[in-house]
């Protein structure tokens, strides 16, 4: 059996990463890290399942104590990955999955260069906007909030270049198969994943960015 590994997945919101991660979890036994955040829970979000919802004071204390593997502040909110559950899962032989944004992803890669980072691109910024609008209809998000999400999404897309592997979520079945392939092959040393490296994906990334 191969060594347990840390996988980092980043994607702008509206890329459908939640569905892809769910599909990956149906196939493999993975420890999904639960982050701490100072933001308020949204409708249906459960403390200890989606996030640990903590106060800014608790967050500061955890930073001071070195309890986070990475932590990042943006949008006036703070997020952090608790270190201990990850160390425990790895010692138990489980692969760990972190769903975090790029600042946090880079911190982890610095501390644990053997972690595998994956960036999920939308097929286009127009499709990202469509998905965000569809979701906003369900959640009741305002136009302002949609615009804010789009504004942060585009600069985030450029950061795809700093990830080990880059994939597109256009067709869901194809994307789920791609993520499975990246996961299984990365666990076997990364051979055969050339199609997902920045060199191979450059044209795709540039096209998404050019039409942003
Ligand atoms: P949301 O508030 O919509 O749940 O998440 C906003 C962003 O924060 C997403 O891009 C998500 O991946 C990222 N995020 C969630 N947890 C963490 C964390 O522990 N650390 C970092 N750096 N980002 C996180």
Image: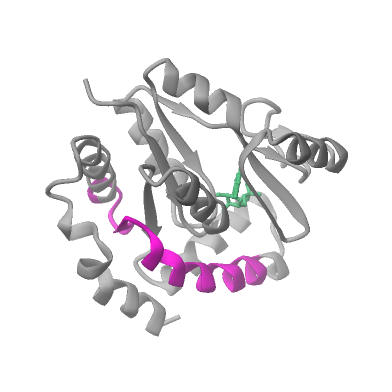
Indicate whether 35 appears above or below 100: above
Residue drawn at x 20%, y 45% is 190
Q: Nearer the viewer, residue 156 or 145?
A: 156
Residue drawn at x 28%, y 50% is 175
Assign the C terminus to one quadrant of the image.
bottom left
Q: Quadrant of residue 126?
A: bottom left
Q: How many numbered discs, if any?
A: 0
Indicate whether 148 appears above or below 135: below
> What segment is highlighted magenta in the picture?
146-174
- Dominant secondary structure of the magenta stretch? helix
Left or right: 20 as drawn, with respect to 111: left
Q: Does 150 lie within the magenta span?
A: yes
Tell me where residue 35 appears, x and y as whole percent: 62, 37
Residue drawn at x 65%, y 42% is 80
Residue occupying the far bottom of the picture:
210
Tell me where residue 69 appears, x and y as whole percent: 59, 39
Left or right: 23 as drawn, with respect to 193: right
Residue occupying the far top of the picture:
92
Q: Quadrant of residue 202?
A: bottom left
Indicate whether 25 appears above or below 104: above
Name the image colouring: one colour
Q: Nearer the viewer, residue 195 or 25?
A: 195
Q: Does 44 lie within the magenta span?
A: no
Residue drawn at x 34%, y 27% is 4
Tell me where residue 20 appears, x and y as whole percent: 38, 42
Q: Nearer the viewer, residue 9 or 15?
A: 9
Indicate whether 57 appears above or below 46: below
Tell me where residue 31 appears, x and y as whole percent: 45, 26
Assign the N terminus to one quadrant of the image.
top left
Residue occupying the far left of the picture:
192
Left or right: 57 as drawn, with respect to 175: right
């Amino acid at each position: 059996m191969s060594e347990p590994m840390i996988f980092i997945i980043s994607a702008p919101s509206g890329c459908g990463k939640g569905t892809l991660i769910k599909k990956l979890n149906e196939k493999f036994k993975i420890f999904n890290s639960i982050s701490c955040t100072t933001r308020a829970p949204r409708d249906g979000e459960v403390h200890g399942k989606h996030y640990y919802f903590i106060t800014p004071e608790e967050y500061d204390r955890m930073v001071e104590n070195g309890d986070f593997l990475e932590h990042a502040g943006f949008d006036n909110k703070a997020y952090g990955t608790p270190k201990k559950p990850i160390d425990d899962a790895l010692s138990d032989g489980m692969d760990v999955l972190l769903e975090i944004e790029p600042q946090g992803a880079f911190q982890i890669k610095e501390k644990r260069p053997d972690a595998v980072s994956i960036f999920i691109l939308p097929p286009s910024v127009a499709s990202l906007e469509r998905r965000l609008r569809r979701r906003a209809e369900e959640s009741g998000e305002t136009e302002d909030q949609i615009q804010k999400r789009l504004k942060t999404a585009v600069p985030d897309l450029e950061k795809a270049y700093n990830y080990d592997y880059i994939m597109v979520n256009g067709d869901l079945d194809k994307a789920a198969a791609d993520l499975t392939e990246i996961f299984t092959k990365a666990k076997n040393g990364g051979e055969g994943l050339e199609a997902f490296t920045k060199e191979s994906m450059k044209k795709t990334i540039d096209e998404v960015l050019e039409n942003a």
